[in-house]
Amino acid sequence: MTDTESTMSRIESTALDLFSTQGFAGTGIRQIATGSGISLASIYHHVASKEHLLYEIQRRCLTQLRDRAEQVERSAPSPLERLDGLIRQHVRMHITERKLCLVTDEELWALPTDMHEQIVELRDSYEAFWRRCLRDGQADGTMRITAPSLTRLALLDLCTGPARWYRPDGSQTVDELVESYARMGITLARGDAGHNNQP
């Protein structure tokens, strides 16, 4: 890693820590510079603005989610198996990359219009994997869904929750939580259609 890459990594890490604990509005660029061990003047050699830092954080998070969802869609043959995979990767990332997901989920409002539109487009491309999965499950009868859009939003809201409350010293391991959420999500989407079937 070059000195420039190392410095940029420290800046992004510091910004993520501060955004996740103080919020974007409560964080100043001077705080990010100080936390990164560089001067206020120096930070502008690496980033254009605080908003650009937030944009890059959110872009990184949603790109990872989208890429993992694409792998799930390619590898899972049935809608129920795809939904199981989508839930598991979403919950796991919201636990293991808690700060990254928290800032992405809660600070979208702070981006300027052009950046906001790009992030919304990326978010929509990720949610499209969920949309197709639920549509296919509705079509083949394995999911008893009367309101696919509402079901998608409910599932995403459910699976995003751990980013807000998870603590490593909790009573359940990451794997146990992922398993619990997968079962809850499948039950929600399946309704009373084929209740004995497992993905």
Image (tube, helix red, strand yellow):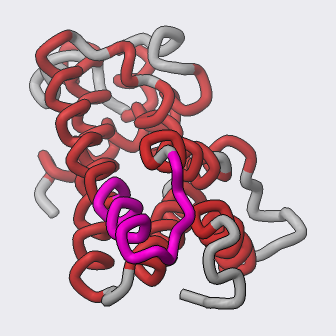
Considering the whole magenta stretch, tell me its main secondary structure.
Answer: helix
Q: Is residue 80 above or below residue 153?
A: below
Q: Quadrant of the C terminus?
A: bottom right
Q: Is residue 114 visible?
A: yes
Which residue lies at the image location 32% right of the left edge and 49% below the top edge? 127
Which residue lies at the image location 26% right of the left edge and 52% below the top edge? 128
Residue 34: percent from left, percent from top: 42, 24
Taking 37 as reference, is 179 left or right? Answer: right
Residue 28: percent from left, percent from top: 42, 11
- Please state the total of marks drawn on the protein image: 0
* Residue, far right: 171
The image quadrant of residue 7 is top left
**Relative to the observer, which residue lies in front, 161 or 182?**
182
Which residue lies at the image location 67% right of the left edge and 52% below the top edge? 162
Residue bounds of the magenta highlight: 130-146
Q: Is residue 7 visible?
A: no
The image quadrant of residue 67 is bottom left
Residue 4: percent from left, percent from top: 12, 46
Taking 144 as reference, is 79 left or right? Answer: left
Q: Quadrant of the N terminus?
A: bottom left
Which residue lies at the image location 59% right of the left edge and 21% below the top edge? 22
Magenta-span inclusion, residue 163:
no
Taking 34 as reference, is 47 left or right? Answer: left
